[in-house]
Image (tube, grey):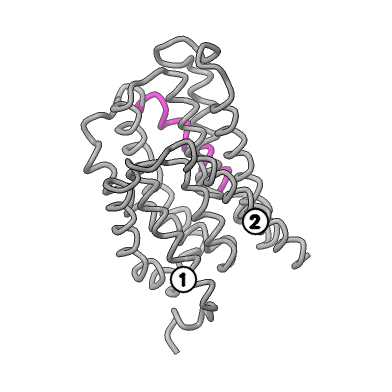
Amino acid sequence: MSDLAALDLPLLGWLVLGVSALVVGIAKTSIGGVAALPVAGFATFLPAKESTAAVLLLLIVGDVIAVRLYRRGADWAMLRRLLPAVLPGIVLGALLINVVDDRTMTLVIAGCILAALSVQLWLRLRPAAALPNPGHPHLAATIGAGTAAGFTTMVANAAGPVMAVYLLAARVDKLRFVGTNAWFFLLVNVSKVPFSAGLGLFPPATLQLTLVLVPVVLVGAWIGRRVLRAVDQRLFELLTVTAALVAAAALLTRAALTG
């Protein structure tokens, strides 16, 4: 029996993982807020810790595509300020993964998704005038955002809303937003690979699963670039938030049933 077959996934599991991989591609080339959905989808049908590593590899594929499309818009001065603060958060996340059991990890992932969604809703409801003044955020805010992004991305691949808050606070234009975001997540996600490997989160089955799903990510990237422009973004974001809440609830239910 192959390592992939040893996962013993039901048909529903394969469907959810396939849709999750599709959403990874969509998130990386259009509406980044949907990235919480693959995290929940993978954690529902794979061991919670290994699921973060499987999603990580697919995210890197999407990051490469995003950088190729938006690389010229990056604000490197902002990245140089932000990236050094990410490493402590990644280390803290790796330490947490190393000491908690799978049930606790499921709860942590669900909590990160709910926190990310709370930030998204806060951004939607908060008046634009209440955001900070334009320019690079204060050093303390940069360190806080970097550490929070490092921790949430290590434990749940859910740092998107943290970066959104930081970039919106800096009042960057759309081109700088997508370019800076693309480079940030490529560099951060690649830096997480040694930590995940050191924690033993890349068994052969995970690597084979990722290889199978890479073409689906590419299809999702194509959809994100060409189709979602025609979709009403307000409705899409509402459906995304609703679906992610359901996914987080499913993870909490799974943790309760296995407790």
The residue mark sitting in front, 1 or 2, is: 2
Q: Residues within 10 Å of mark 2 (few under 14, many from 20)?
A: many
Q: Nearer the viewer, residue 158 or 146?
A: 158
Q: Amino acid at mark 1?
A: Pro
Q: Nearer the viewer, residue 92 or 118?
A: 118
Q: Nearer the viewer, residue 75 or 41?
A: 41
Residue furthest out toward the bottom: 1
Q: Position of residue 119 (x, y in %)?
A: 58, 32
Q: Position of residue 255 (x, y in %)?
A: 72, 61
- Does residue 59 lie above or below 74 as drawn? below
Residues in magenta, as a range: 79-93
The numbered disc on residue 203 is 1
Q: Position of residue 217 (x, y in %)?
A: 34, 58
- Does residue 89 lie above or below 78 as drawn? below
Q: In the displayed structure, does residue 217 sit left or right of residue 198?
A: left
Residue linked to disc 2: 105
Reply yes or no: does residue 80 show up in magenta. Answer: yes
> What secondary structure is marked by label 1?
loop
- Measured in 3D between alpha carbons, the distance from the residue under mark 1 to the one under mark 2, in whole angstroms, is 18 Å
Which quarter of the rendering shows the C terminus?
Answer: bottom right
